[in-house]
Structures are given as structure tokens and as C-alpha cells.
Image (cartoon, helix red, strand yellow):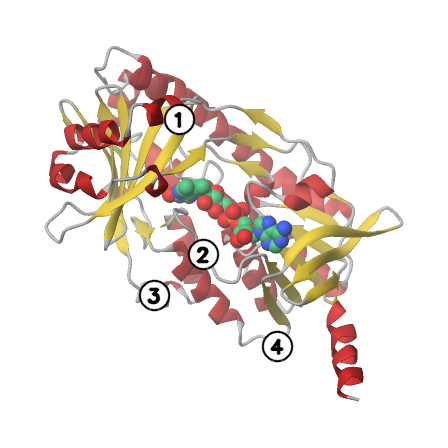
Amino acid sequence: MQQEMQKQVHVVKQRIHTTCCIVGSGPAGMVLALLLVRKGVPVTLLEAHMDFDREFRGDTLHPSVMEMLDQLGLAERLLQLPHTKMPTLDFEVAGGTFTFAHFDELKTKYPYITVIAQARFLAFLADEMQRYPHFKLLMGAQVDQLLEEDGRVCGVSYRGPDGRYEVRAPLTVGADGRFSRLRKLAGFEPINTSPPMDILWFRLARKADDPRGVFGRFGQRRIIALIDRQEYWQIGYVIPKGSYQRVRAQGIASLRQAIAESIPFLAERVDELVDWKQVAVLSVESNRLPRWYRPGLLLIGDAAHVMSPIGGVGINYAIQDAVVAANVLSAKLRKGEVQTRDLAKVQRRRELAVRLIQKFQVVVQNMVFVKTLQGDGTFQVPLFLRLLDRIPKLRTLPARVIGFGVIPVRFYT
Ligand SMILES: Cc1cc2nc3c(=O)[nH]c(=O)nc-3n(C[C@H](O)[C@H](O)[C@H](O)COP(=O)(O)OP(=O)(O)OC[C@H]3O[C@@H](n4cnc5c(N)ncnc54)[C@H](O)[C@@H]3O)c2cc1C
């Protein structure tokens, strides 16, 4: 009898019916779920991991995201959680500090980048959604199959902690990140551009009297990003593409020495770095899909376009995709009328912004990154950036592009 019941429960669990099935609870999937459930659309959100913790994930929320959260009445509550504010984006260069982006001069209630652990941000949004009975978050759900009927995607099949399940929905959204399984299952091939660098990520202790915030240090053929994670520094050490094995062969002591030379206040802490196991290698990629949708399926965020890390715009763009998707689709989903042309509209509204920022990233990569890594060791801030900084009307352009995206996006409440 007990066995019968268990079997029955299992059968019921195997097929969940919802209106929108979202795969991936990163920034894109989580924000889309939030915006849709608030509009009354039933959503099931599937996440392969059992928690939101990831080593070295981006932790930046841009003014556009904060404004959107403010529209939803969530920004002030989010700011109660531990975070730091980054009013400018600075580069340390041989001649001193160059401020690339003046967020503090933007006309917004949130004139800074909010640096908050991404796991904390995602958990905050997940908590907020628990009060909507038509929202379901399933952790440990590894999606590995698209369900199709008459040429239309009608849901997914996934491996859960205790067996196989299905979610059926008129719309499935792939928000499953840079290695998107749904993208592969749908047969989509991205157009790749190969940024000329990779990044080594590691952490070193942070002391109370260290400088605060996020900054980059350029020079001596090195580019190093420092991100203040309160208890520690997250450090990104940029290396030429494909050179990891060569860097590694030089030994961990040579990495320690490079950090100590470039960032003197960390010199007495570099000994914490004893093994390459402490170092994660990020193969930097940049790509975009020519087509983000198929009948019944839409891809957003990194699944549709992986961003180069320049400007730290990946999270912002992923969330902006979610906002546009919610604007275009929520009323249609409520009526059960989503057409393929609606999915095309989401891509049309976002694609130009993605293409423009990726072009801008290529220019910066070539003018700044390649020259610094391969040049004679000196680093000059490019003339166009110095000029931009001196023209009052253009001075805030980099901050606006990074903070709000090339084409700003607003949520229609
Ligand atoms: C090391 C590193 C540092 C970065 N730093 C920054 C930064 O400072 N600022 C910034 O803006 N961007 C940064 N980025 C980029 C940023 O993290 C991404 O652009 C952003 O997270 C994209 O959001 P997303 O929701 O599209 O995808 P993701 O955040 O990648 O989320 C995808 C989710 O889908 C889940 N998933 C994957 N496959 C499956 C499956 N088969 N079934 C179910 N779930 C699945 C994953 O577990 C994950 O939770 C960084 C990226 C890296 C790798």
C-alpha cells in the first residue's frame, strides 16, 4: 500500500504543468521568474545545483537593475544585506588613477554599482517569490531533454535528486548560462568571437584598512582586477589567451611575485597562494546566437550571448533580457497566446544592444588589453578615453553605457 502511494506521488511529480518553464536560476532566470509571477503567470524554475553558491561569479548590480528593483519595491530591502557601493570604476596606471566610469555623476537614485554576493542576491529574489502560490523553484533539477510536439517545444525532462521528471509548458525559457544545454538541444550554433585573453581567479585576504571597492591595475604587461568581497579580495589576473600552461610552468612563486610587484599592499599576503588548486582558470569567451528562439522556446542571458568580461556587463545584460521578455510576454502568457513572433520580438528588442556592446568590447580589448599584455610594458590610457573624460557632456558616457546598457530598458509594471 505504502509502495503504491509512493508510486502515485512519484507519478504526480513526474509531470508538472505550468505556463512558463524557466531553466536556470542565475540572474536572467531568477529575474524573469520574479517579473512573471508578479504579473500572475504560473512559473516553474529549474536549477541544476542545490544552492546558489558558485566560486567566482559576478557580484555586480548596475544602476538599471537597482532602478528596476526599486520599481518593484525591493531595492531598499536588498540594500539591507551586506554589500559595498562602487561610485567609480578606476584604473591604477603608472601616472596614478584614471577614472573610466563616473557612476556617481549619473542622474539616478542609485549612482553606483552595488557589489553584493550573487548567491545572496539570488536567494533574496527566491525568498521574495515564495509567497506566490503559482511559483515553484526546483533545485537539483538537471535538465537534459527538450520535449517536443508537432515541431514545437512543449517543456523539458530533467533528472531530479530521486528520479526523472517532466515539466510541460506552452513556453520554455533557457536561461542556463554560457554552457547552455538547451542551446545545444535546440541545435543552435553561436557565432563566436575569441577575446585574446583568459583570466586566472583566486582570492587573498582583505584587511580592514585596505582600499575599498573594485579597481583594475594596468602596466608592466599585466592587467589585474581587484574585487572587494568584504572578507577577501577576489583577484582576476589576465593572461594572453591559451597561455595558462606556460604561466603555470613558471611556477606559483612567479604569480606571487607578479601580484606583489603590481599591488604592493598585497605583498605580505601573497604567501597565502601556495598551490595552483587555489587558482581557477576562466577561458574568456564572447558569442551570440543568430536566433534566440524556436516555437515554444526562448533563450536569454548568457545562453543567448556570452559577454567578454570587459565592463562587467554580463549580469546587467542578462537581467535586461529578462525585463524585455517579461514586458513582451507576460500578458500573452496569461492569456495562453504566446506566438513565435512574440519570441522574435524579444530578440529584436535586445539584439542591437548586445551587438553594440560586444563591438565596444572588441575595441577596448584591442586598444587596451592587447597593447598592455603584448606591448613594451608601459601603459597609456588611450587618447579617446582621456578626451572623453575632459568633455563635460561626454564624461559620463562610459558610466551610462555600463550602468544602463547601450539601449536602456525599463520594466512596465
Ligand atoms: C568568473 C566570472 C566572473 C564574472 N564576473 C562578472 C561581473 O563582475 N559582472 C558581471 O556583470 N558579469 C560577470 N560575469 C558574467 C556573469 O556571471 C554572467 O554574464 C551572468 O551570470 C549571466 O547570467 P545568466 O542568468 O544568463 O546565466 P548564469 O548566471 O550562468 O546562470 C545559469 C544557471 O543555469 C543553471 N543551469 C545550467 N545548466 C542547467 C541545466 N541543464 N539544468 C538546470 N539548470 C542549469 C546553472 O547552474 C546556473 O545557475 C562573470 C562570469 C564569470 C565566469
Q: Which residue is mark 1?
A: 244
Query: Going 74% across and 57% down the picture, which residue do you hit?
Result: 157
Q: Nearer the viewer, mark 3 or mark 1?
A: 1
Q: Which residue is mark 2?
A: 68
Q: Which residue is mark 3?
A: 76
Q: Amino acid at mark 4?
A: Pro
Of all residues shown, which one is farthest toward the bottom? 1
Q: Which mark is residue 214?
A: none
Residue 204 placement: quadrant: top left
Q: Amino acid at mark 3?
A: Glu
From the viewer's side, name the closer residue of 5 and 210. 5
Query: Which secondary structure, mark 1?
Result: helix
Mark 3 CB in 8 Å range of ligand 1?
Answer: no
Residues marked 4 and 2 touching at CB (< 8 Å): no
* Residue 389 drawn at (x, y percent): 25, 27
* Residue 93 drawn at (x, y percent): 19, 25
Query: Going 25% across and 40% down the picture, which residue do you hit?
Result: 274
From the viewer's side, name the closer residue of 259 and 98. 259
90 displayed left or right of 280: left
- The CA span between labels 3 and 4 is 24 Å
N-terminal-most mark, 3 or 4: 3
- Mark 2, other Cα within 10 Å: few <14 / some 14–19 / many ≥20: many
Q: Amino acid at mark 1?
A: Tyr
